Image: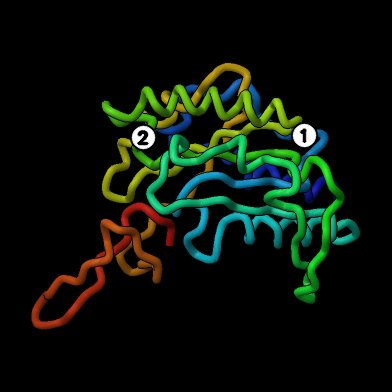
Amino acid sequence: MMRLFARVMLAMCLAVAAGSHAQAQTRPKITSLGPDYPKATLFVGNSFFYYNNGMPGHLSYMQRAADAANKAAYRNTMATIGGSGLDWHDMDNLLRPGGLGAYSFDDQNVVVFNKPGKQFDTVVMMDCSQCPIHPQLKDAFSTFARKDSEIVRAHGMRPVLFMSWAYLDKPEMTEGLAEAIRPPAMPMMRWSFPRASPSHASASFSRSSTFMRRTSGTRVRRVPTSHPA
C-alpha cells in the first residue's frame, strides 16, 4: 500500500515533463518529498490550482485512495488569486497560527478542528504562468521564490516550487520555465499533461480563451490554451 502511495506522490509531485525535448532540461537536485511524505499541504498560487474542481482536491482523493487506513490524516488546502504571482500573496500571514487549516471538513461535511500549531507539512508555490520567464517579472519571481521559501522554512514547513505546463499554443515555454525554476536545494514540482487536441476541449476557460468566435454561422468556443482539459 505504501508503495502505491509513494507512486501516487511521485506522479503528482515530481512528474517529469513529457517529450524528449523536455527531458534535456535541467533536472531539480531534489527529486522526492519522501520518505516522510506530506499529509497536509497548502497550495499558494492562481487559477492553475483552482480550475477543474481544484488540483488540491484531486490530490486528496488520490492520497486517501492510496492510503485508506490513514485517509483522515490527508488535507490539501489552497490560497489562490486568479492571474496572481507570488508577490500578490502574503506568505507569512497565510501561515499564521490559528489561520488557514485551523479546521476542515470530513467526508460527511462535519467540521473538524485540527490540532493547534503547524497546520501544513509542505507549501506548494506557483508564480504566474509567465512570470519566471517574463522580461519584466522574472526578477520578482526570483525575489519572492526565495523570500517565501525562507518564510515557509521558518514556520517548520517544506517549500516546493510548482513548474506549470506550457500553453497549448506556445510549447516553447517549457524550456524557458525548466531553466528558470531551478533554484539550488529546493524541491521542484514538474507536472506534465498531454497536449489536448481541439476535439478534447475543456469546459473551463482562461481569461485569454473566454470569447466566442463565429465560424460558418456557428458560435464556437475557442480551445483553452493555458488550463488543462
Residue drawn at the location 22% of the way across and 67% of the way down: 211
In front: 184, or 120?
Answer: 120
Q: Where, quadrant-wise, is the C terminus in this rendering?
A: bottom left
Answer with left or right where residue 210 lies relative to residue 128. Answer: left
Q: Residue furthest right?
A: 69
The first of marks 1 and 2 along the sequence is 1
To which residue does mark 2 refer? Answer: 131
How crowded pointer 1 is (Cα within 10 Å; few <14, some 14-19, many 20+) is rated as few
Q: Is residue 43 above or below residue 137?
A: below
Q: Are marks 1 and 2 in contact (CB under 8 Å)?
A: no
**Number of marks:** 2
Residue drawn at the location 43% of the way across and 33% of the way down: 22
Q: Which mark is residue 34?
A: 1
Answer with left or right where residue 109 lies relative to residue 182. Answer: right
Q: Is residue 3 above or below residue 141?
A: below
Q: Position of residue 173 (x, y in %)?
A: 33, 36
